[in-house]
Amino acid sequence: MLGRTVDISLGGVCLLVPEQLPVGQTCHVGFEAPLNGKLVRVIATAKIAYSILSGTDGFRTGVQFLQLDAANNKTLAELMI
């Protein structure tokens, strides 16, 4: 499912998606973010922490990272600087 990244942290990401997702469900999440003038991709195994209606924009969905390999963890840490 495609969505829009709202907020990113070391522990997870908040997404705006068109459908409500079941809390507790494990999933794979991937997103692209700008870093040093280019788009970098982060991919992780994650769990849906919350999914709430956000007006007419869709569902604001919090996703908690469960597994992040070393390369993706490094990229995420660089994004936080």
Image (spheres, grey):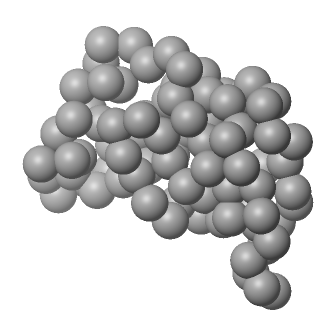
Q: In this view of the protein, can residue 61 be seen by the observer?
A: yes
> Where residue 24 sits in the image (x, y, percent)?
78, 31
- Which quadrant of the figure has residue 78? top left
For this view, does 19 lie left or right of residue 14? right
- Percent coordinates x, y for residue 52 in the rendering: 77, 64
| Residue 79 at x, y percent in the picture | 23, 46
Which residue: 78% across, 49% down? 1
User: Horizontally, is 45 left or right of 70 in the view?
Assistant: right
Badge count = 0
Name above or below for residue 10 compared with residue 9.
above
Give the residue at x 67% y 41%. 49
- Left or right: 47 with respect to 78? right
Figure check: 80 above or below 65: below
Q: Is residue 3 visible?
A: no
Q: Position of residue 72 (x, y in %)?
A: 35, 25
Say which residue appears at 42% left-offset and 35% top-offset. Answer: 11
Give the quarter of the image for residue 40.
top left
Residue positioned 30% across, 18% down in the render: 71
**Does residue 73 lie above or below 57 as drawn?**
above
